[in-house]
Amino acid sequence: MRSSFPLSGLAALALFVAPAWAQTNYPLTVSNCGVDVTFAAAPERVVTIKSTATELLLALGLGTKIVGVGFQDGPVPAQWASAGANLRVLAEKLPSQEVVLETEPDLVYGGWESNFAADGAGERAGLAALGVASYVSPAACRSIKPAKLSFDGVFADIAEMGSIFDVSPAADALIAEQRAALAAIAPDPRGLTAVWYSSGTKAPYVGAGSNAPAMMMEALGLKNIMSDVDDGWIAASWEALVDANPDVIILVDAAWNSAAQKKKLLAENPITSKLDAVVNQHYLVVPFPASEAGVRNVDATADMASQLAGLTFSK
């Protein structure tokens, strides 16, 4: 994937030129997935769970604040690889509360709300009682249904994290870069249909109408065959895909279910092997860490736009 946002230098420069009015006034209280979280000061020791959380902090120049990571979905992109080179891995999957607390964090930042469970990083109320703040990526809320995701929503999340850490100039610089890159993406004019194949073998788990897959497909000019389902992702059926016969299949490339494995399954499955997209290899590939709401969405959309421009169709 190409790197559109080498922002470490910009973010660092922004911190030095920040005007007084850009500074955060503490205590700061934010409402996050139905929980009011108050910060007496900018967090100094942060545990990040999921790549979306880790990568946003790296993009804002906050890598030195990260004292531990868990449940990383893939390697850190090249533009942040140096900043993320020595992160302490607490667990390959979800770290336990005991492991999390050993790092003495003042914030646990999770990419999924389910990260905050008694058998995981700890329930949010319990962490708060111990003086540890918690924050969930807003698009991943489940206790409160998030609004349909838009790029403006992604940018608002970046801005909120900038306020929490008192690095609003860095957040503003990142958002400006991403807005410019997004504006440069021309939606495909061919009226193509698509399905976002995230995971699953017995049945496909696909992008529906309200989260990152829908947002990115819309920016690409693709008609999402599951757009009428008001959810982020759903378990569909192979028959539904065959009935829709999408022009394009977007494959999420994950370590545990790669794009190559998905292509093999689609080609060997008698139900899907005759799909036009399978026969003609009309695939787009997106890395798993870029498939959820976060700092990599714009870059991933631009990359898929380049892939899509290279596909030819007879109709």
Image (cartoon, grey):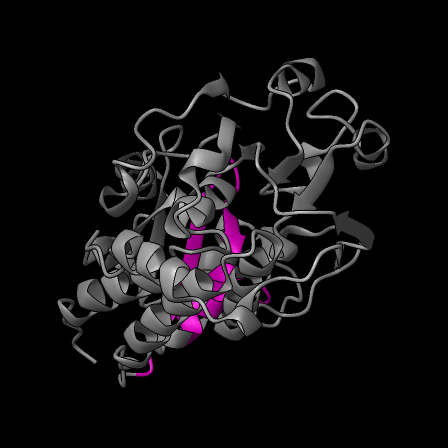
Tell me what residue is drawn at x 68 percent, y 69 percent.
147
Q: Quadrant of residue 169?
A: bottom left
Tell me what residue is drawn at x 28 percent, y 42 percent.
263
Which residue occupies the foreground of this view, 36 or 252? 36
Which residue occupies the foreground of this view, 300 or 29? 29
Which x, y percent locates residue 160?
A: 60, 61
**Residue 34 shows in this picture:** yes
| Residue 285 left/right relative to 24 | left
Q: Is residue 266 magenta?
A: no
Which x, y percent locates residue 152?
A: 52, 74
Which x, y percent locates residue 69?
A: 50, 27
Tell me what residue is drawn at x 21 percent, y 55 percent.
3
Q: Which residues are magenta?
A: 191-218
| Residue 181 left/right relative to 33 | left
| Residue 301 left/right relative to 62 | left
Which x, y percent locates residue 75?
A: 32, 33
| Residue 193 left/right relative to 31 | left
Residue that protrudes farthest toward the front in the picture = 20
Q: How many marks?
A: 0
Q: Is residue 215 magenta?
A: yes
Which residue occupies the foreground of this view, 263 or 96? 96
**Residue 201 shows in this picture:** no
Residue 10, above or below 151: above
Residue 154, above or below 129: below
